[in-house]
Image (cartoon, rainbow, N blue to C red):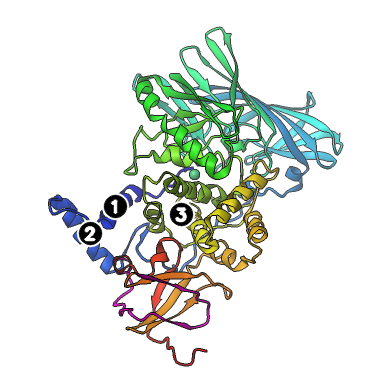
Amino acid sequence: MLFANMFMHFLKIIFTVFMNFYTIEATSIRVIKITIFLLFIVIQTSCSLPGIHFKPANPKHAGSYPKATERLRLIADQTTKFRTCFDVKRYELWMTPDPVNKKINGRSEITSYALSDIDTLQLDLDERLALSEVRVEGQPVRFYRKYSAVFIIAGRTIKKNQRFRVEGSFSGKPLTAAKPPWKGGLVWKQDKNDKPWTAVACESEGASLWWFCKDVTNDEADTTLLHYTCNKSLVMVGNGSLLSVANNGQDRIYSWQVSKPINTYDITFYLGDFVLIEDSFKSISGNWVPIRHYALRQNEMRARVHFKSAKKILSVYENCFGAFPWQQDGYRLVESPYEGMEHQSAIAYGNGYRLDDTGDDYIILHETAHEWWGNAVSATDLGDVWLQEGFATFSEYLYMAYTHHADPERYMFQYWLAIGNKRPVSNPYNLRFFDYRDGDVYTKGAYALLSLKYLIHDDTLFMKIIRTFYERNKLKPGGSNTKDLESVISELTGKDYTWFFNQYFHSRKVPMLEYRILENEGIVYRWTDCDSAFAMPVKIRSQGDDYFLFPTTKTQFTAVPQIKKIKNNNLFWVMRQGLFVSIYEVYFGLKPSKKLRKEGIL
Ligand SMILES: [Zn+2]
């Protein structure tokens, strides 16, 4: 899912102006000058605009989590015996949308493997939809529903290690998305020619919003078969490769096959007057990977040009992380009636064919990264969704760094400004917690990875860590968590980085570098508001020379002969003077102090 900061565009504009303060020509328009002046006032007074933080700060009040009501527990708790007793192997889904009445009609067939003896099991379907019949191994069985949970009484004991099949038919009016993709549901729109244009987004809410499934993030089917029916004048696109198109009276049935494990929220459909744009790219694996984009007919020519950029992005990400994960299923962008979503091998694209000031399309850049981070490596629980969003955001940085067409640190700094520090990056499990209004899983997650890169201080080793983590965790049954990353880092560096993880992932607090400048003498400093073992090195620059400080929570002094007095510590000054240059690369705050003394330091 894409970053949802409502001030993002505004932020990008002021950030660009701000970063170019000293290079703006005398001929620049007056509006920019006024903006700079206003910006100057804001920064000098160290104000925060809503959602933008010019100084890293520790908010007094922590962000809250949703109350674990019975309704929430039934959908969010992945540890109950009714869910852990079986492992889904295969989904087959039939679905027909009715865009006129905003209804759907479908059937799911779920083949699973019993992990223990089963009398009752839980599947899920939103309570707005009717469930007409449930069968186990072809026999009708009893079931009862509580909110979105469907408890199925098998009628006989399904023995451990047995494969079994559950079928259910569903219909009705699913939730209409209030703010897709962040507040999800079905999106019923019409294109400019008044033809139906329908899609779905359900990452936060879950796939059971529109189909009958085991709605968890820690159990992915190995293969999925999708049969979508629509009027012959339209096209229905799903994930994976197109197996067949069958005529059925006035309708057509599009059958799609996903040959690799897939998150249930990634399983999707798009209905519209689409045209196919076929292409392929040469993967580093040596294979030609099929590309089958679908654009609205009215936008075909724009899409043919615009979607070409995806090939360069795929190539950079392959070099960073490894071969594109869906070699057989392929890659595609599908024009969607909302901004974007990482639907596996069928990315929702709705950014209006726009380019950012870096010359890239953020949606293609970000959502394509999710094919590696989110789709191949998936978080066990949305509590660790930063593994998907933080890595996808950090991938944007790597793309900038590898292509050298934009300053990667400057690019990242826009995210720095949006970090809120209300909650830790790694959140509690079994709450289905993913609050789109708290972007720290994107921004701080990515900044934590940048800080880690700085800390490791060996880019070859750092990228080896990223690739090893990817390689070991891609398509991992049950998904991955923050601890999996920590153990790869410990193994490859031979060091214990518990303090780093405690600080940047499990605590919401910003480490603050408390310091005092002694003019023409040096700097006294220590870390505060941090893990007791926090030991992030910091680079400062004075009169063109770099000095490395190795602060801990104990007060230290480093001689920096030419250092000037720091008048204040706001961001504007810091960047202008070039001091604390690692503020670009490491996430921390500055806390000037008059108390710190060099006397008495051993
Ligand atoms: Zn995302």
Question: What amino acid does circle 1 point to?
Answer: Thr
User: Which residue bears the numbered disc 3?
Assistant: 443
Name the quadrant containing residue 488: bottom right
User: Which residue bears the numbered disc 2?
Assistant: 22
Question: What amino acid does circle 2 point to?
Answer: Tyr
Q: Are marks 2 and 1 in contact (CB under 8 Å)?
A: no
Q: Earlier in the sequence, mark 2 or mark 1?
A: 1
Task: Give me the residue at 64% from left, 66% from top.
Answer: 495
Q: Between residues 282 and 301, which one lies in front from this camera angle?
A: 282
Name the quadrant containing residue 108: top right
Residue 35, image x, y percentages: 20, 55
Task: Give me the residue at 22% from left, 56% from top.
Answer: 23
* In the image: residue 116, left or right of residue 291: right
Question: What amino acid does circle 3 point to?
Answer: Thr
Count of marks, rendered view: 3
Find the magenta span and give its range: 545-574
- For the view shown, which residue lies furthest in the bottom direction? 600
504 w.r.t. 307: above or below: below
| Mark 1 closeness class: few <14, some 14–19, many ≥20 residues within 10 Å | some
Can residue 373 be seen at all in this image of the molecule?
A: no
Task: Give me the residue at 55% from left, 13% from top.
Answer: 252
Q: Which of marks 1 and 3 is nearer the N terminus?
A: 1
